[in-house]
Image (cartoon, rainbow, N blue to C red):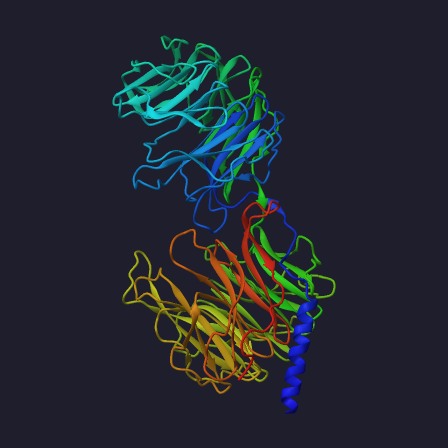
């Protein structure tokens, strides 16, 4: 009776405390900004006569599979007006090419996506953006479905806009409504590719490749064409039509004629005029008339510069090549646009670590560039957050592209360390953090790329009260050539550091003053190849669980060795004496990975990932498996564990009443299906089953997650999601959720 009363009072206190907590989620740090992860390509730009707008395809900005389309404006001084970019809505989330045109009142960004009615011909869709950077269409307009698209081209005369694609075209009004088409550029003409179009402010000229010829035809002010074509040349080679522009009266097209690059001057009526050789060094898309002459983008692959050549109104080169920027490698994407007097240049550049994307304004007469400005940036992405609590505040450690960071958070979610405290260079493993009763202890693997490589297992202590990093350079626990994972478990007077050196599991204790004990072997002799590791303390002993990698007889890769994985474990005494002469066989299905361990102060709960598919098909759905292990090392559930829930186990903790398990679940029905992060519960005794789960977040990417016990029956979740808010720029960021109260049955 007395125990029931105490339990009831505890539950009432839990409920009261939960009501006092701040709801919602909080970021783990303030954002710092830099180049977004991933790649940018397919750049295109236009001008409204004053400013510029550039659009591009952005891939791998986060772990979501689809590519995205972004746009940003740049003013005539070279300032980027939308530094985090304007993300455009898409239908399928998959795009290949993008183009921009100014309609007369607003910009139109259009692109191709997989068709809804054809498997081999895409559709052309687009949205408008105002001069002020306001998205005018919440969903893309479908202009053409099942189109033959190679290279799009668009031009506007201020009243009508013509978009050409393959051998076809459409005509739009100033509001991007289709007023004519889709139709053939020439009646009865098929097979055209690489179409381009330009306007002289009144009429239009279309140039395209067909067979072994390059042809052109003139359209009137409404986009209505003639029934004939003019042969520009009959000796094309690879990428024959490079560009097309107008000076407001006639046109110049840049083509590859044989092995030479030439500028063909074409009159307002479509007649062929002068032809001039152009000493183009590198074919980079970008050609416009500005400041009284044409500007043609070029590059110098020897000096590693990107620049411009000036041509007169007839296409005759004037002066020499002028470099505007230097770099390591250009060509993944480049474009320019004219505002009448200057040109906005935009280009991507490969660097050692990432891909930059820059813009500059080049004067049409002097060819002098303005300042070079990054076109887009984002908050630094955050990965692998892991949390702990001192009871006075929480602390989280995480990886960013430039380093390993930590930050403290008050119990109600307020940031104590702003942007975060840089602990070290980026960790080569998922970092771990624990509270040892005095300090936060951080563990990570520091990989040094030497010959042979060096992998250091390190720890550092962080003061809970003032955030001081007590070991600025870190303390080396172990140094070797290989390390695959590290784990921490706080004991009564020291913290266990366990890690895989790729052949075995090792462990050492770290005292509260940072003194490291002698490493011992935590895995029995049968183990020869190990992966990730996890450890927990039950008050009397540690349990260490790890991946045991077995050379596969069913999966073959070339070169290299494929492995099947089983989960094994072993117990260690407080003095690190190995208590099991043979490893505990936690699983034997050879389809398991990523064990995670927690203790209720007596026994242990191990959860891990198991793939549903039979080998060698390890790419399908998975589920979470759980196994209880007693303090004497015996399994308390059936061999190889009990299926707990669909998904991937992320974290496990004991909250004083039950085990809490964080798992990410994903329905395998396409890239657009979001991942759901749940917290479920497992009782300390009785049959293993998942109690009523609590949804934490739903997101497009598979989240990291870590549980922090905040009180009896309560946990807070640290997790990642795509930061779609304006201040983050669509990169993965880490957040702390509100504490989760108990759900379902608390104990048995």
Label count reads 0
Q: Is residue 304 visible?
A: no
The residue that appears at 57% across and 31% down in the rendered structure is 73
Tell me: residue 472, above or below residue 637: above
> Which residue is drawn at the image coordinates 68% and 61% (left, top)?
413
Q: Is residue 358 above or below residue 366?
A: below
Pick the residue in front: 392 or 13: 13
Looking at this view, name the residue that lies furthest to the bottom: 1
Q: Quadrant of the N terminus?
A: bottom right
Work out whether residue 575 or residue 600 is closer to the camera in this orientation and state it: 600
Provide residue 221's location: percent of width, then percent of height: 43, 15
| Rendered position, 129 above or below 683 | above
Q: In the rendered image, which quarter is residue 184 located in?
A: top left
In the rendered view, does 524 fall on the left or right side of 489?
Answer: left
- In the image, farthest residue toward the right: 466
x, y (%) of residue 225?
A: 35, 16
Taking depth in this image into account, of 378 and 137 the one nearest to the observer is 137
The answer, for residue 6, to whether it is visible in the render is yes
On screen, residue 745 versus residue 120, left or right, reads: right
The answer to which of 460 and 650 lies nearer the viewer is 650
Q: Position of residue 646 (x, y in %)?
A: 42, 67
Residue 718 location (% of width, % of height): 58, 62
């Amino acid at each position: 009776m007395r125990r029931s009363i105490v339990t009831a009072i505890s539950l009432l206190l839990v409920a009261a405390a939960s009501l006092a907590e701040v709801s919602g989620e909080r970021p783990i740090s303030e954002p710092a900004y830099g180049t977004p992860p991933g790649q940018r390509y397919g750049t295109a730009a236009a001008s409204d006569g004053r400013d510029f707008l550039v659009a591009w395809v952005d891939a791998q900005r986060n772990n979501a599979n689809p590519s995205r389309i972004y746009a940003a404006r740049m003013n005539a001084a070279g300032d980027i007006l939308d530094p985090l970019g304007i993300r455009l809505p898409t239908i399928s989330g998959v795009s290949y090419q993008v183009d921009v045109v100014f309609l007369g009142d607003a910009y139109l960004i259009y692109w191709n996506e997989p068709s809804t009615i054809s498997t081999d011909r895409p559709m052309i869709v687009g949205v408008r953006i105002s001069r002020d950077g306001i998205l005018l269409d919440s969903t893309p307009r479908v202009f053409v479905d099942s189109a033959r698209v190679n290279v799009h081209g668009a031009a506007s005369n201020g009243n009508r806009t013509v978009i050409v694609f393959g051998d076809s075209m459409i005509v739009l009004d100033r509001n991007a409504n289709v007023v004519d088409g889709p139709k053939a550029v020439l009646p009865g003409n098929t097979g055209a590719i690489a179409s381009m179009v330009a306007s002289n402010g009144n009429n239009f000229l279309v140039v395209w490749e067909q067979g072994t010829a390059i042809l052109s035809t003139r359209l009137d002010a409404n986009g209505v064409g003639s029934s004939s074509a003019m042969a520009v040349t009959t000796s094309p080679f690879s990428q024959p039509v490079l560009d097309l522009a107008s000076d407001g009266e006639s046109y110049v097209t840049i083509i590859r004629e044989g092995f030479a690059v030439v500028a063909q001057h074409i009159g307002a009526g479509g007649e062929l005029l002068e032809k001039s050789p152009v000493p183009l060094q590198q074919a980079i898309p970008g050609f416009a008339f500005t400041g009284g002459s044409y500007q043609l983008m070029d590059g110098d692959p020897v000096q590693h510069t990107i620049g411009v050549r000036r041509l007169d109104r007839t296409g005759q080169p004037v002066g020499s090549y002028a470099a505007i920027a230097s770099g390591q490698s250009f060509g993944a994407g480049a474009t320019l646009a004219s505002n009448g007097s200057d040109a906005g240049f935009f280009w991507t550049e490969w660097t050692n670590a990432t891909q930059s994307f820059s813009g500059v304004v080049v004067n049409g007469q002097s060819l002098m560039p303005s300042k070079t400005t990054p076109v887009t940036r984002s908050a630094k992405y955050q990965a692998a957050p892991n949390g702990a609590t001192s009871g006075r505040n929480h602390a989280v450690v995480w990886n960013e592209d430039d380093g390993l960071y930590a930050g403290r958070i008050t119990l109600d979610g307020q940031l104590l360390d702003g942007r975060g405290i840089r602990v070290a260079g980026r960790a080569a493993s998922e970092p771990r953090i624990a509270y040892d009763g005095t300090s936060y202890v951080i563990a990570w693997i520091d990989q040094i790329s030497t010959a042979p490589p060096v992998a250091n297992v390190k720890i550092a202590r962080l003061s809970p009260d003032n955030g001081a990093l007590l070991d600025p350079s870190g303390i080396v626990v172990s140094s070797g050539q290989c390390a695959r994972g590290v784990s921490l478990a706080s004991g009564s007077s020291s913290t266990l550091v366990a890690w895989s050196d790729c052949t075995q599991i090792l462990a050492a204790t770290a005292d509260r003053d940072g003194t490291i004990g002698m490493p011992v072997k935590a895995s029995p002799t049968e183990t020869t190849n190990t992966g990730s590791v996890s450890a927990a303390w039950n008050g009397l002993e540690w349990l260490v669980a790890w991946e045991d990698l077995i050379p596969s007889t069913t999966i073959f890769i070339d070169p290299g060795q494929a492995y099947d994985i089983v989960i094994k474990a072993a117990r260690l005494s407080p003095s690190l004496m190995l208590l099991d002469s043979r490893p505990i066989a936690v699983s034997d299905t050879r389809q398991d990975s990523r064990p995670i361990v927690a203790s209720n102060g007596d026994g242990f709960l191990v959860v891990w990932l198991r793939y549903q598919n039979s080998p060698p098909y390890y790419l399908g759905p998975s589920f979470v498996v759980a196994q209880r292990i007693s303090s004497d090392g015996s399994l308390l559930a059936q061999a190889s564990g009990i299926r707990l829930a669909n998904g991937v186990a992320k974290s496990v903790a004991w909250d004083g009443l039950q085990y809490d398990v964080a798992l990410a679940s994903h329905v395998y029905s396409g890239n657009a299906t979001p991942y759901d992060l749940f917290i479920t519960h497992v009782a300390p005794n009785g049959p293993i089953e998942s109690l009523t789960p609590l949804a934490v977040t739903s997101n497009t990417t598979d989240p990291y997650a870590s549980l922090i016990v905040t009180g009896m029956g309560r946990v807070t979740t640290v997790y990642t999601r795509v930061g779609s808010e304006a201040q983050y720029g669509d990169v993965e960021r880490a957040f702390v959720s509100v504490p989760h109260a108990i759900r379902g049955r608390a104990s048995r």
